[in-house]
Amino acid sequence: MSASSGIQIRAFAAAACLSFLAAACGGDPSGVDVPAAPADPGFVDSAPAPAVAAFVDTYATNQRGDARYATMSTNAGVRVLAGFRTLWQPLTDIVDAGVSAPAVDGFPAVVTSTWTGIPTGGAQNGTALNPTVLNANVQYVIDATTARTAAQAQAAYYDDRRGKGYSVSDGMGPLTSAWRAAAQQTTSITSIPADATTTLYNDSGNNTGVGSSSNATFGKVVDLINAVGANASTEPAKRFYKYERPYRWSSSVVVAPTLVPAESSTPATDGGFPSGHSAEAVRDALAMAYLVPERFQEMVSRGLELGENRILAGMHSPLDVIGGRVLGEASAAANLVAPANATLKQAAFAQAHSALYAATNTDASTFAAYAHSGSAATDRFADYATNKANCLRRLTFGFNQIASTSVAATVPKGAEVLLETRLPYLSADQRRVVLKTTALPSGYPMLDDAEGWGRLNLFAAADGYGQFNGSVTISMDASQGGFNAADTWRNDIGGTGKLTFNGTGALTLAGANTYSGGTQVQGGVLIAGSVHAFGTGDVYVSGGTVAIASAARASIAGKYTQLKNGTLELDRDAGDAGRLAVTGRVTLAGGTLHVKLGTGLTPRTGDVIDLIDASQVSGQFDSIVVDGHKATPLYRPSGVEVRIDG
């Protein structure tokens, strides 16, 4: 055995040779009894839009000038946040004497000029329907601001005073400098002035950058980011809900000293719910994620991070920020769905990649790696696990579930557009199912809105399906490049459905999967990037390739069957890496076994390498290729090995 290999390699003795060769004499593979492919479930999962007024159809009603007269019936921005009405009943039934309020869409308007903006036990501005949650909402800010670090206070200042488009662009990580240079973004807030505690500084930079009228190479990108802000104002909702900023609810909230000058002196026009900064940051970040999906999850994280910084600033509460996130997501989707932006978004996507390829000396095959080439020291979103945990925390901010936890998720009309470039090989209907199967559980405060915006988890959705229900067929076209050529799904996929994979691209399943309907590979490369990548069912390879990555020993809980047009690739490395364990029977009706040896494995001539373990092995491969070596296959009743011949 090679002492340095750390893998089971045995010298091939003469007696063992006879035993292995005898086991190999199983007859013509064409005579093998081939099991049937996993049964088709007979249906395809779907996520129909709920039968309610859709934000993407009515978002034009959300006009800043409508703020004084906005109602649930007349304003989409107010209506999309209706989940807040289960916690707080705003003062909505007082009509200002002597004011003639115009009707909107046939509904009488409501004027609420009696709102002072200063809470007096809640009675003057509205009624607390769930005091427990609302008290916890303010207490969260008290706790966060009293424990705030100097670094958090600094981040809160920059995210408050800078243009939101400029702020969130640092979510691009290694691409940030190239992005800002191409967009020609500027900010005047480059440091925190010594007198910031007494003087208010406003950003005189250009926020998102220079548009296409003066920026030929990146202007369409800037145009699209600006376009997602259409009909996205938070002012109507602020005026309607009349819920105060946390420092007005409690004097124990410690506003960051450098932001005290930013406190408004007119509370009646300065509502806390929803957070305008959060809404703008989320929609800008989602536009950037749409344009550079190679940084999709990082940009989602950056948008949510800015929202949390509003809490750390003392300027907003968790519910304010959640409301901003919901409105920001809906606004981004509505503008990306809008037919008027169809040509712009395509041009902007192409322009973003062309300019960034040139700036980073990359191409379609190397750009994604460059986009993730930063370290924790240079890219605070570099660590996937930390990023994922922070995202999940910022979706609910630790609130307990207060309603049924088992209500099925609904997916808003048009929401699938947010995944259009991140999962381009899926149909629109499939992207809707991804959103449904990765949504937050029900029952969290404010998040059970009628359309489903509150429960969307876009970070998880970028990692593919959360469940396979029914028949799931994925086809990738590698010739289109980007994610069409290669992608990784990191969710833990459950469900009783079956996965059928074909095309020419490569998809890695990297979660602890439990789906039970089986896996059929007809084309392309389906890669096991985790021990339980293939769930608990059978794996049937009639074409294409099943690859076992060197990350871990993969396990198939059911049977493994391979036909003549199929290939099994084992990326074998030290220990059990790249080894395949099959609980059921392995049936080999031909095809190819391709073995790649990693740097941790240095076999010598005559060594035997374990590849497949099973309860039973029937048949043989048509051919076996071991990169860099001549090798002989060795079949035994419960496994397959290779002997290195040179």
Image (cartoon, helix red, strand yellow):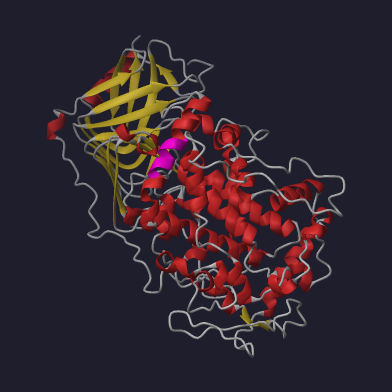
Vertical comparison of 374 with 453: above or below: above
Figure check: 40 above or below 351: below
The reply to whether the magenta stretch includes residue 446 is no
The quarter of the picture where the C terminus appears is top left
Residue 106 higher or lower than 378, as above or below? below
Q: Is residue 276 left or right of residue 617?
A: right
Residue 154 lies, in percent from the top left, at 77, 47
> How far from the left and from the top, in percent, is residue 266?
75, 71
Q: Classify 84 as above or below 502.
A: below
Question: Residue at coordinates 56% horizontally, 30% vertically from top-left?
Answer: 373
Left or right: residue 194 compared with residue 29: right
Residue in the foreground of this view, choosing between 459 and 32: 459
How many numbered markers are drawn? 0
Query: What secondary structure is the stretch in magenta mostly built from?
Result: helix
Q: Is residue 351 magenta?
A: yes
Examine the rendering and report whether any part of residue 392 can be seen: no
Identified at 63% across, 61% down, the residue is: 276
At which x and y percent is residue 404? 51, 75
Left or right, 616 with respect to 164, comes to left
The answer to whether residue 118 shows anywhere in this view is yes
Q: Which residues are magenta?
A: 346-352
Please tell me which residue lies in front, 592 or 397.
Answer: 397
Query: Hey, which quadrant is residue 383 in on the image?
Result: top right
Q: Position of residue 156 (x, y in %)?
A: 73, 51
